[in-house]
Amino acid sequence: MTQQSENVIDRWHDMMAHGTTDGLYDLLAPDCVFWSPVVHTPQRGRDITHMYLSAAGQVFDADFRYVREVRDGDSAVLEFECTMDGIQVNGIDMIQTANGQITEFKVMVRPLKAVNKVHEKMMAMLEALKNAS
């Protein structure tokens, strides 16, 4: 793994641990791609990726935690768990990095009840963010 990609993932972990998105925009490559577990098309670009990740940071409950991690070169797979309205959520963040930035961020969630709950909460948060701007 390159030192640069290690720093990107470490910076991501730091943001998650502190519940902040400070510095997130600069951590994302201008042409990064976000793959949502509930949207069938890839979301392309820094602005929309930032919006999705910022919304997710507000949606996931305080008990969000990473429980396993695999890093290989410029890629990382981070397994997470949390509870959302009493539903156990289990998923992974697959992160690709290059040149000190995140170039691709893919989220997968299970089980189906959790996918449905994430969808419900994320759509409400994205709508609220859209209305606030």
Image (tube, rainbow, N blue to C red):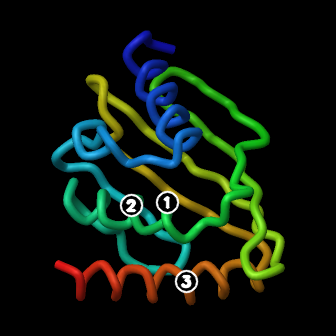
Relative to 91, is 97 on the left or the right?
A: left
- Element carrying mark 1: helix
Label 3 is placed on what type of residue?
Lys
Label 2 is placed on what type of residue?
Ser
* Residue under the image location 22 percent in, 38 percent down: 26
The answer to whether mark 1 and mark 2 are in CB contact below 8 A is: yes
Relative to 4, is 75 on the left or the right?
A: right
Q: Quadrant of the C terminus?
A: bottom left
Which sits in the foreground, 4 or 58?
Answer: 58
Relative to 82, is 58 on the left or the right?
A: left
- Element carrying mark 3: helix
Q: Is residue 79 above or below residue 116?
A: above
Q: Disc 2 and disc 3: Cα gap in Å?
A: 13 Å
Q: Which residue is mark 1?
A: 57
Could you say which disc has been placed on residue 75 in the image? none
Where is residue 67 drawn, in percent x and y? 78, 42
Where is residue 58 drawn, in percent x and y? 49, 66
Relative to 26, is 2 on the left or the right?
A: right
Which sits in the foreground, 126 or 96?
Answer: 126
Could you say which disc has been placed on residue 121 in the image? 3
Could you say which disc has been placed on residue 54 in the image? 2
Q: Is residue 45 above or below residue 21?
A: below
Q: Disc 3 and disc 1: Cα gap in Å?
A: 11 Å
